[in-house]
Image (tube, rainbow, N blue to C red):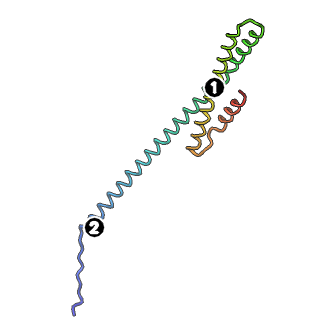
Amino acid sequence: MDNSFGVGINFSNFSNYFQTKKRNEIEAEKLKFQLLDAKNKTLENLSNEYELILNTFEILRLELENTTLAKEIFNLKKSQYENNKITLEMWLNVQNDYQKINLLLFAKRKNLITKMKQFEVKIKSSCFRQELEYLSINLTNQ
């Protein structure tokens, strides 16, 4: 009886294994950089969106503060009408203009509140708490 056996080693299998392993490592690194790049772009887009919302809020805040002047003009014209200093047509035009201003500001506030809430849902954080409170207070005071 012969107790010998043969072992054959094929070095091309080792070569293929190491080539595939190296290729997979390179692909993994490439994917890692693609993910980091996508993450950075997403963060940049979110940052830009946040800044745009804040800028819109500041502009609207200034507009809301300037409504005091529009209200004073409205009250002045009202007293002029009550004292027969202006015609009914002029008074109705003043009322119409004042209502348009208030309606426009109301729509801007509602739109901005919606954008802020959508952004907070997107990032899963309450980052506009004070701004939303300010807009809600001014919404009810109109």
Query: With 33 as the anchor, is 48 left or right in this view?
Result: right
- Which residue appears at 46% of the width and 41% of the height? 41
Q: In the rendered structure, which disc, 1 or 2, sits on the residue that comes first in sequence?
A: 2
Q: Name the residue under label 2.
A: 14
State which quadrant residue 120 falls in.
Answer: top right
Query: Vertically, is 132 above or below 82?
Result: below
Q: Which quarter of the image is occupied by the N terminus? A: bottom left
Residue 51 shown left or right of residue 3 in the figure: right
User: Residue type at mark 1?
Assistant: Leu
Question: Which of 60/127 is in front?
Answer: 60
Residue 5, percent from left and from top = 23, 84
Quarter location, residue 8:
bottom left
Residue 130 coordinates in the image, percent (x, y): 67, 36
Query: Tag 2, which secondary structure?
Result: helix
What residue is drawn where x is 39% and y is 51%? 31
What is the C-alpha distance between the residues marked 1 and 2? 73 Å
Closer to the eye: label 1 or 2: 1
